[in-house]
Image (tube, rainbow, N blue to C red):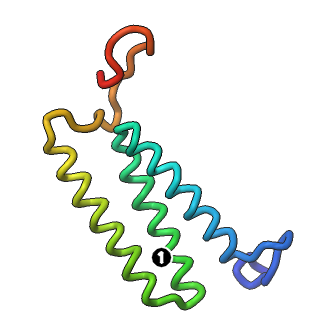
Amino acid sequence: MTIASTPERNGMTFADELQIAGWLLTVVGQIQVALKQRQGFITWIVANAVLIALCALVGLWWSIGMYATNVAVCAWSFVRWSADAAGPRRLFAKRTARWSASPWS
């Protein structure tokens, strides 16, 4: 028997697990974006992909459009933010110690 066909496992369904994963990834992505880290955009897009999968699994077809719109807005924000002179840190920026240079180095 596979995980997808098992209705409950430890009191949680696969849909529950997807919902929790999507929520956690959304929060992590928002924190990363608030800290001006580009990884936040990737995390946020992955979170929306998980939530799209959840909506497809449970048949919430109209909600898929909402999450697809979130992905488009996230990609648009990434492009706009990257164009800003004081934009976010590079994806693989070399970090300095907290007590040395500015936090945006």
Q: Is 18 placed left or right of 55 in the picture?
A: right
Q: Which residue corresponds to the image point at 34% horizontal and 38% vertical from the top-left?
A: 36
Image coords of residue 26 (percent x, y): 50, 57
Left or right: where 10 falls relative to 23: right
- View extreme (right): residue: 10
Q: Which residue was labeled with disc 1?
A: 52
**Amino acid under disc 1:** Ile
Residue furthest front in the image: 34
Q: Residue at x 44, y 50 (%)?
A: 30
| 76 sits left or right of 29 in the view | left
> Residue 41 location, x and y as percent?
36, 52
Residue at 64% across / 64% down in the picture?
Answer: 20
Residue 87: x, y in percent? Answer: 22, 37
- How far from the left and from the top, in percent, is residue 12? 78, 72
User: Quarter of the image holding residue 3?
Assistant: bottom right
State left or right for residue 60 relative to residue 105.
right
Q: Which corner quadrant holds the N terminus?
A: bottom right
